[in-house]
Amino acid sequence: MSELQAIFGGTFDPVHYGHLRTVEALAALTGLQKVTLLPNNVPPHRPQPVASPRQRLEMLRCAIAGAPLFDIDDRELHRDAPSWTVTTLESLRAERGPDQPLAFIIGQDSLLSLNKWYRWEELLSLSHLLVCRRPGYPEQPASAELLRWIETHTARESRQLHQQASGLIFQAETPLSPVSATAIRHRLQQNLSCEGLLPPSVIDYITRSGLYRD
Ligand code: ATP
């Protein structure tokens, strides 16, 4: 079986250490060699990111320069129609073949509302789900149906993720990082320092482009 590949989707408005350091820790815990960052094309009926797709992509490029763990897949940004995670995973699965172990990374907050995602129950037929801890959220979902689904598919050991192509949920003991993009945008609006919350190269890009100032 070939190496486990991982995809990490997000709006990345902007990308921050809550994404990057958490996923670096996840990679060390689960033996991931490569994590592909996948900036989302947000459906029109959802709150739109403040930064444009091009700006979010540029911030990701700044963030991963010199970080060999990461690469970027910008396929969702090239589509006119909004992309759902399940349809993006379908295209990745078609490209990589039925036997390639594939994992989609999410934070604990996303797991708790996973049953609101389009065709959520099909996600595990396409990939594993790798879940990072995130402070400030309950351990378990409110929905009994979702809780049962999580329990049914939980892998106790990360090595299981390498042994099958899809179908497992692994909740990793990643260190807690209290950073959020919303909090960073608010700090920038108030002209407060964001040092230590996101890479200096991303802060430089934001400063140069005047993003998030009002
Ligand atoms: P916002 O504050 O605008 O909602 P965000 O900081 O949650 O943004 P997103 O780009 O929406 O960032 O998140 C992408 C993914 O990263 C989601 O699955 C989310 O759960 C996860 N994530 C974001 N921040 C953290 C964090 N601090 N720790 C762990 N996971 C995180």
Image (cartoon, rainbow, N blue to C red):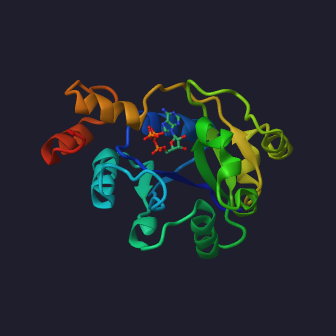
Where is residue 206 shown, x and y percent of the image? 21, 43
| Percent position of residue 146, x then y | 78, 44
Residue in front for this viewpoint, 108 or 171: 108
* Residue in the picture at 16% in, 44% down: 210
- Could you say where residue 140 lies in the image, as x and y percent from the top left? 73, 31
Q: Where is residue 10 in the image (x, y as percent from the top left)?
A: 48, 50
Q: How many marks?
A: 0
Q: In which quarter of the image is residue 90?
A: bottom right
Res. 34 in view: no
Task: Check the picture and name the quadrant holding the N terminus.
Answer: bottom right
Q: Can I make out residue 5 in this image?
A: yes
**Vertically, is 19 above or below 11?**
above
Q: Given the current orientation, which residue lies at the most extreme front position?
A: 45
Q: Which residue is drawn at 38% across and 30% down?
A: 183
User: On screen, 148 above or below 70?
Assistant: above
Quarter of image, res 127: bottom right
